[in-house]
Image: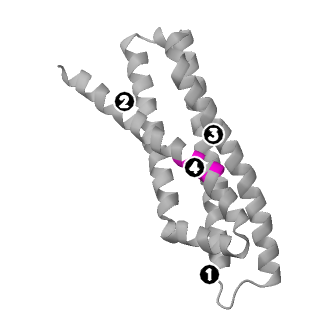
C-alpha cells in the first residue's frame, strides 16, 4: 500500500468519522434535546446550562465541523489535482461540491449564530439572583433565533449527507 493510499484512507476516516459525529449531534440536539429543554419549562435553561457547560459541546461540534470540512476539501482537491481538473467537471464531483457548500453553510451558521447565542443564553442563565424580566425577554428572543438557525443548520447538513451519499453514482 502506497503512502498516498494510506493518506486517503486516513482522510476518509477523519471525514466520515467527524461528519457522523457532527451530523448525529446536530440531529440529536434538534430532534431530542431542544424539544426536551423546551418541555422542561423553568428547568430547561438550567439543563441547557449543564449541557453546554464550559462550551464543551460547542467546541466538540466546531472541531468536528472543521475536521469534516478540511478533510473533505483535501480529498476533493487531491482528486481534482490527480486528474488535472477533469474529475472536478464530472457529475459526481459537482454533487460532492453541493454537499461541501451545504456543510460549509451549516458550519458558518453554527459559528456566526448558534455558538454566540448559546453562550449568551448560558450567561443569562448564570446571572446571580436569576435573570431580570428584561434578560428573560432577551433569552426568549435568543432561543427563537437559535431554534431557527439550528433548523437551517440541520437541513443544510441533511443536504450535505444526501449529496455525499449519492454523488458517487451520478
**Is residue 118 left or right of 165 when viewed as pictured?**
right
- For marks 4 and 2, the one nearer the N-term is 2
Q: Say whether residue 27 is magenta.
A: yes
Spot occupied by residue 67 in the image (x, y as percentages of width and height):
42, 42
> Is residue 151 depicted above or below 115 in this figure?
above
Numbered disc 3: secondary structure = helix
Disc 2 is placed on an element classified as: helix
Residue drawn at (64%, 50%) of the image? 30
Which mark sits nearer the N-terminus, 2 or 1? 2
Question: Predominant secondary structure in magenta?
Answer: helix
Residue 8's quadrant in the figure?
top left
SS state under label 1: loop
Front of the two marks 4 and 2: 4
Return the mark for residue 126: 1
Residue 72: say if magenta: no
Marks 4/2: CA distance?
Answer: 24 Å
Boundaries of the magenta span: 25-31
Q: Which x, y percent locates residue 58?
A: 52, 59
Q: Which residue is mark 4?
A: 28
Amino acid at each position: 500500500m502506497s503512502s498516498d493510499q494510506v493518506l486517503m484512507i486516513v482522510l476518509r476516516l477523519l471525514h466520515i468519522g467527524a461528519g457522523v459525529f457532527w451530523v448525529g449531534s446536530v440531529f440529536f440536539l434538534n430532534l431530542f434535546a431542544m424539544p426536551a429543554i423546551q418541555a422542561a419549562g423553568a428547568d430547561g435553561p438550567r439543563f441547557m446550562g449543564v449541557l453546554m457547560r464550559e462550551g464543551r459541546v460547542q467546541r466538540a461540534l466546531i472541531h468536528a465541523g472543521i475536521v469534516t470540512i478540511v478533510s473533505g476539501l483535501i480529498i476533493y482537491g487531491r482528486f481534482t489535482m490527480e486528474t488535472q481538473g477533469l474529475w472536478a467537471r464530472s457529475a459526481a464531483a459537482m454533487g460532492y461540491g453541493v454537499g461541501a457548500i451545504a456543510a460549509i453553510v451549516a458550519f458558518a451558521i453554527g459559528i456566526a449564530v448558534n455558538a454566540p447565542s448559546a453562550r449568551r443564553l448560558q450567561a443569562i442563565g448564570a446571572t446571580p439572583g436569576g435573570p431580570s424580566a428584561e434578560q428573560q425577554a432577551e433569552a426568549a428572543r435568543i432561543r427563537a433565533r437559535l431554534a431557527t438557525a439550528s433548523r437551517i443548520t440541520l437541513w443544510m447538513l441533511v443536504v450535505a449527507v444526501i449529496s455525499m451519499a449519492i454523488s458517487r453514482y451520478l
